[in-house]
Amino acid sequence: MDTAMTRQMYKDMGIDGKIFDLGEEIAFRLKDRFEEIDRTAEYNQLKVVGAMQKCRASEACLYPSSGYGYNDVGRDTLEEIYAAVFHTESALVRPQIACGTHALALALAGNLRPGDELLSPVGKPYDTLEEVIGIRPSRGSLAEYGVSYRQVELLPDGSFDYPAIRSAINEKTRLVEIQRSKGYLTRPTFSVQQIGELISFIRQIKPDVICMVDNCYGEFVETIEPSDVGADLVVGSLIKNPGGGLAPTGGYIAGKKEYVDNAAFRLTAPGLGREVGASLGVNQPFYQGLFLAPTVTAGALKGAVFAANLYEELGFSVVPDGRESRHDIIQAVTLGSPERVIAFCKGIQAAAPIDSYVDPEPWAMPGYDSDVIMAAGAFVSGSSIELSADGPIKPPYTVYFQGGLTWEHAKFGILMSLQKLYEKGLVTLPE
Ligand SMILES: *Cc1c(COP(=O)(O)O)cnc(C)c1O
């Protein structure tokens, strides 16, 4: 097929020829990067299929269960598969885990007892955890149950402050929470190797401390996971990377059996733990989503790298930059004006398969101190492995975007974001 046909197709879909050509040029330059991403996906694809084979996934595993969910073979086998993928003793993978925050809250509350202290050695954790921990006073927080909290800031260059971490660890420190992804902050995302170095350091000071990693947005970006470098627990959401876009809900906790079981006693009830909890009809999409997760993550990653290079070419500042190695799927683009943030998000929405005709507007949202514009046209509500963007309407006017179930769709969305900026005269295209 010749390029002219593709160019015409983009034109029919609302993308100007000049923008298509710029996109072609950027994508051409990224050939080697993309090949590297494909190699990682290939490795991880085999890792997942290998785990499914080793655990003898069968047709019966895909059937629904109901009621108490005793002997739910599909659920139990899937948990063995997650444990095999993450190289852990055990895993809890459930639709009853409502989201990533819930999974993190279970892992924390299940493993901390009154008088224990929780330490974040990587600065402020993800916003929603502030209420879980009680950094912001909140009903039912760990603070209300007598669990104290300490935080060590990162150094100005985003690296670990080892001396401060050493002095923060004390006889009460029971669990250390390390957030892999920058989330919606501007610090760097940590590589798995960096996380491993931090864990080794902490272990030298206090060998029996539980090292837990918030793995959200990081799964399958590299060939190893934090559990391969010493993490006792890795935790994440199934409507991000590991659900492969098909999981309709859910979260996972993988790690040492004792710690995963402790989280399970929190999820259901003391004494019941992982024995109950019907998987209803979600086994099939959980399995198939995990199967697709390595390539879906690769598509999202290509989209992020493409956007970084495209917007960098146009003179905007981007985090991570176009050449940096990647450890999660989030891309931040600083656009410098509210009009540009709005146009960008309208472009992402206009490229969506669902609700493409909806025109997003900035709005006051709970938990945010400014209006926020959000673009999401997803098959699974709120899914951020699907192409999505959020822009708080405040300086420096940065949009955070992530996802794309396929590279082709991510590319279309990013070109559409630029199209909207271009139509409004908010950007100058290179000659
Ligand atoms: C998404 C995310 C979470 C959890 O968010 P939910 O919206 O509750 O799923 C926690 N930490 C990080 C770094 C995240 O990206």
Image (cartoon, rainbow, N blue to C red):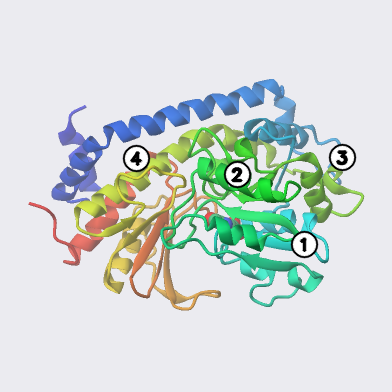
Question: CA–CA distance between discs 3 and 4?
Answer: 42 Å
**Point 61% across, 22% down: residue:** 50
Q: What element carries label 4?
A: helix
Question: What amino acid is labelled 1 in the image?
Answer: Lys
Which numbered mark, 2 or 1, is in the foreground of this view?
Answer: 1
**Is 190 on the left or on the right of 235, as rendered?**
left
Q: Looking at the image, which residue sits at the far right?
A: 271
Q: What element carries label 1?
A: loop
- Residue occupied by mark 2: 247
- Residue occupied by mark 3: 70
**Is 274 on the left or on the right of 104, as rendered?**
right
Viewer-proximal residue among 169 and 175: 169
Q: Which of marks 3 and 1 is nearer the N terminus?
A: 3
**Is 335 on the left or on the right of 383, as rendered?**
left
Q: Which of marks 2 and 4 is nearer the N terminus?
A: 2
Question: What amino acid is labelled 4 in the image?
Answer: Glu
Q: What element carries label 3?
A: loop
Question: What amino acid is labelled 2 in the image?
Answer: Ala
- Residue occupied by mark 1: 172
Instruction: Please determine whether, in this image, residue 15 is positioned above or below residue 73.
Output: below
Label 1 CB, ligand 1: below 8 Å? Answer: no
Question: CA–CA distance between discs 3 and 1?
Answer: 38 Å
Mark 3 and mark 4 in contact? Answer it, CB < 8 Å.
Answer: no
Which numbered mark, 1 or 4, is in the foreground of this view?
Answer: 1
Question: What amino acid is labelled 3 in the image?
Answer: Tyr
Q: Which of marks 1 and 4 is nearer the N terminus?
A: 1
**Point 61% across, 35% down: residue:** 228
x and y percentages locating residue 385 in the rendered image: 49, 48
